[in-house]
Each structure stands twice: as C-alpha cells, then as structure tokens.
Amino acid sequence: MSLAAIVRVWRQERGLSQPQLAKLVGVSQQAIQQLESGDTRTPRYLVRLAREMAADPEALLDGRLEPAGGGRAATPPGVAAPLPNAGGAVPTSFGARDLPVYASAQGGPEGMLVSYEPIEWIERPSPLAGVPSAFAMYVVNDSMEPRYRQGDLLLVHPQRPVRRGQDVLVIRASDDSQHAAYVKELVALDGARVRLRQLNPPGEFELARDLVVGLHLVVGVWYGG
C-alpha cells in the first residue's frame, strides 16, 4: 500500500476532511490533496503527519502503517459478515487494551480452528482504531511461511473489502462454536467460488462461496519469537 493510500484511508476512517487533517498537521489543504493523489511522495511535514497518526514515519514511507516505536505491523494488501465480539461492545480507541484475541488451534494440514471466545485482550494498534468488530488471532500452522509463521499474531479488519492479491482470513460454516479458518492469499472471488493461494507447500485451491461465512482482510501482523 502506498503512503498516499495509507493517509487517505486513515483520514477517512476517522471522519476527517482534507482541510481538517491539514489543520492538524499545520499545512495547506492543497498539500494534503497532493499527498493523497500521489503527487507528493516524500512530504516535508512527514514527521508531523506521523505524529498525528501515532505512526512510525519511516514505515509510512515504506508503505506500512506501524505504531510509533511499536511492533512490526505488516500491511499486506475484506468484507463479509464480521465475527462477533464475545464480550459485546467494547471501546475501540487506539492503544486501549480492548482488542480480543480469538483462540485458534491446528485444524488439519492447511487450516485452523477458530473459536469466538477471546483468550486474551491486547492493546489496539492504530490500523484497527475505531473498528468495533476487529480482532486478532495467532497463527498455528505453517501454510503461509515465510510470510506468517506459527506464533505470529494476525490483525484482522472485518469491515474492509478484499481484493485479489491481498491476504485474508477465510471462515467456513460450522454447526458448533469452532469454525474452520484459512489464512491465505486471495486469488479470485465471485458468486460461486473463492480461490486461494498458500505458500507452503505452494498451491491453490477453491472453496464454494456458499460455505464461506467470513472473508476478512489481514491488515497487519505482530511477529512471534
């Protein structure tokens, strides 16, 4: 994702107009417009902008939205029915310890099982600020290595649309409290099928669209040890 796209999405998610963001940063509205259009690639006010976004300025230039001085949050470039927050509505402010981590377990050579009962609550990173249905979950298989390894914590945004080439969390229908889940790269999506790619071993497979109850965008990862 480009710096222009990151800033535009961040601003829109917070309900800010270009003039309002410009005032916060101390620049003209035209400067923000040029940044979001891609005309300005290395703004002179980058540090001030990053401070307002609570983000790392160097990561922004690299096309990543990471908390300032925080963990490594990748932005691999979903919306289906959001997963329920087991505890009901909770605050959704950046930095609050209110982001649920759902339990996951090995569910086969290529998939996982995810439960909707949080096993812990963590501080909300900036990419998920203001997203009530956001959540995190641990990776427990190796099908996406080296991109994601066992023990990495995925950050999931259920309200953004997904596109080909993005990493997604796919949830299959189930009759019990645990659902089959796949973390893959989205290859194709239509009314009949979802085609996915994994890295280890490399390959592609399809799921019938009517079996998929959740298709959520992975917006970042906190790396395990």
Image (cartoon, grey):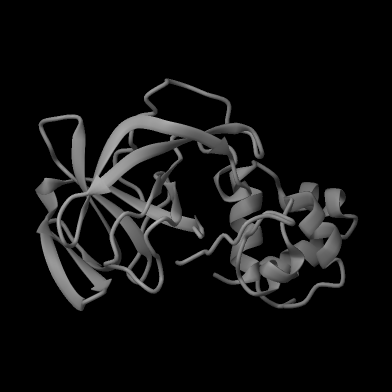
Count of labels in the image: 0
Check the image and report above or below for 120 versus 155: above
Check the image and report above or below for 100 versus 10: above
Relative to residue 86, is residue 191 drawn left or right?
A: left
Does any portion of residue 132 appear in the rendered image?
no
Instruction: Name the residue nearer the viewer: 35 or 215.
Output: 215
In percent of the image, x 73 and y 56: which residue is there? 68
Does any portion of residue 24 appear in the rendered image?
yes
In percent of the image, x 26 and y 67: which residue is there? 143
Check the image and report above or below for 18 versus 188: above
Instruction: Name the residue nearer the viewer: 137 or 13.
Output: 137
In percent of the image, x 71 and y 48: which residue is there? 17
Relative to residue 77, is residue 184 drawn left or right?
A: left
Q: Position of residue 148 (x, y in %)?
A: 40, 65
Q: Position of residue 154 (x, y in %)?
A: 44, 53
Q: Position of residue 9 (x, y in %)?
A: 58, 55
Quarter of the view holding residue 188: bottom left
Instruction: Name the residue nearer the viewer: 110 or 169.
Output: 110
Relative to residue 219, is residue 149 drawn left or right?
A: left
Which residue sits furthest front? 225
In percent of the image, x 59 and y 40: which residue is there? 124
Q: Position of residue 20 (x, y in %)?
A: 79, 46
Quarter of the view holding residue 40: bottom right
Which residue sits furthest right? 26
Query: For the N terminus, which image quadrant?
Result: bottom right
Relative to residue 176, is residue 200 drawn left or right?
A: right
